[in-house]
Image: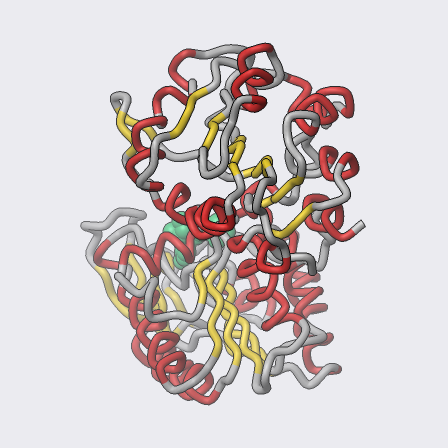
């Protein structure tokens, strides 16, 4: 892996693909963590005596859209990087070319929103080539878009001899490898969330590397029904019952231990204020639906989590958005944090589990929280991400 630490950027202009796709409300950036996440890479280039040309997308514009102009995040970028940032009015036009040409050592230039040009998402080689011509080397630090073969994330790399993994991209890739390739046993995957159908490629891929899988949340009911349980009105994908049985059989063949919840906190309606009652997960009355992992389930999961040396967590084990049904996910998060404090490596990634650890203030108590939703899921499915292979070729 060619990382930025292996290169001296002195007198080099680096074009850096960052992920500055931050939320904006009333012209204000409401969460600057993605800008912050790119700071290590930008600081390294600048402190070497290089210059940075930053490029990112912002939202999903169809052509120019003033509300999604980089001018909306310019001051926040300056604040986070603690330096003046020159703003370009375009991407591959005269303004970008001139400003890049006049860029001195230690200076930072921010190009306009890449997705104002359709060529970006089309992965257009001519557009990528033009982008490449304003810089001496290329750095990709945008894990969140590494699964897309866009002009700035993938296609551009072929025009550079010197191309590098930024420090965020390096951390993401190494964290995934630490679970999928070199995880210290026992390796545990905790899978939750609403639907089994969206997790099947992950389950199939991780089966070869894990020792245990905890299956919780909405997706567990398809397994329980497949095993003959009465799941009341809990969510269930009936068409996936044969797949659930196949997964259980494959796990047994491979000596992977599957842990399902034993009890569940249920409600008569899908609402935070609904009256709740716990039931054996195999015997839920018809008018109740399962909403959260019960106390006995968490107690049983406790030993597995604390005994594991490597933990991957994807998906909540209950409707954690409702405070009255968030306890199972919170307690499981606390156990992952405890196991991490005892020396386990823990990776939390993919959509809602990230939101859950943040909600419960556990993001600094696990080893790594991934910044990429789709990119993380595709990595766990075993796919090679185009943005990553482009840097290696
Ligand atoms: P996913 O995106 O597939 O990881 O699903 C995450 C969503 O699953 C969250 O919004 C949770 O509220 C939801 N979820 C977890 N457990 C349940 C459940 N028992 N019933 C309905 N939805 C659930």
Q: Nearer the viewer, residue 355 or 204?
A: 355
- Residue depicted at x 68% and y 69%: 247
Q: How is the image coloured?
A: secondary structure
Measured as percent of width and height from the top left, residue 272 is found at: 23, 50
Q: Nearer the viewer, residue 59 or 186?
A: 59
User: Is residue 144 depicted above or below 343 in this figure?
Assistant: above
Residue 233 as seen in the image, left or right of residue 322:
right
Residue 330 as seen in the image, left or right of residue 230:
left
Residue 147 as seen in the image, left or right of residue 59:
right
Q: Nearer the viewer, residue 149 or 278?
A: 149
Q: Nearer the viewer, residue 13 or 327?
A: 13
Specify whether residue 194 is in view. Answer: no
- Residue depicted at x 60% and y 78%: 183
Q: Quadrant of residue 382?
A: bottom right
Specify whether residue 24 is in view. Answer: yes
- Residue depicted at x 47% and y 72%: 346
User: Is residue 201 depicted above or below 210 in this figure?
Assistant: above
């Amino acid at each position: 892996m060619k990382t930025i630490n292996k290169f001296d950027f002195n007198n080099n202009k680096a074009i850096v693909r960052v992920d500055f796709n931050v939320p904006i409300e009333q012209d204000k950036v409401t969460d600057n963590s993605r800008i912050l996440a790119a700071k290590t890479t930008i600081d390294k280039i600048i402190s070497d005596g290089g210059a940075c040309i930053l490029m990112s997308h912002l939202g999903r514009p169809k052509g120019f859209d003033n509300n999604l102009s980089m001018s909306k995040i310019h001051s926040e970028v300056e604040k986070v990087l603690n330096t003046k940032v020159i703003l370009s009015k375009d991407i591959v036009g005269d303004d970008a070319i001139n400003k890049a040409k006049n860029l001195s050592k230690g200076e930072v230039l921010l190009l306009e929103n890449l997705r104002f040009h359709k060529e970006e998402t089309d992965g257009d080689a001519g557009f990528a080539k033009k982008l490449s011509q304003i810089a001496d080397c290329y750095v990709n630090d945008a894990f969140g878009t590494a699964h897309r073969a866009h002009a700035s994330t993938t296609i551009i790399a072929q025009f550079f001899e010197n191309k590098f993994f930024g420090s965020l991209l390096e951390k993401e890739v190494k964290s995934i490898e630490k679970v999928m390739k070199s995880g210290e046993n026992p390796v545990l995957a905790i899978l939750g969330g609403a639907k089994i159908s969206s997790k099947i490629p992950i389950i199939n891929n991780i089966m070869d590397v894990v020792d245990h899988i905890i299956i919780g949340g909405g997706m567990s009911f398809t397994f329980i029904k497949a095993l003959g349980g009465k799941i009341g009105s809990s969510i269930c994908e009936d068409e996936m019952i044969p797949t659930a049985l196949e997964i259980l059989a494959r796990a047994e063949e491979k000596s992977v231990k599957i842990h399902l919840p034993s009890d569940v906190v249920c409600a008569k309606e899908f609402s935070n204020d609904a009256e709740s009652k716990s039931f054996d997960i195999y015997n839920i009355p018809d008018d109740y639906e399962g909403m959260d992992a019960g106390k006995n389930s968490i107690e049983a999961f406790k030993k597995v989590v604390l005994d594991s040396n490597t933990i991957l967590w994807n998906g909540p084990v209950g409707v954690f958005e409702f405070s009255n049904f968030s306890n199972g996910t919170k307690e499981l998060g606390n156990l992952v944090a405890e196991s991490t404090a005892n020396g386990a490596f823990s990776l939390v990634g993919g959509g809602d589990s990230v939101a859950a650890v943040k909600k419960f203030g556990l993001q600094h108590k696990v080893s790594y929280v991934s910044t990429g939703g789709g990119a993380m899921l595709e990595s766990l499915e075993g796919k090679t991400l185009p943005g990553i292979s482009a840097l290696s070729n």
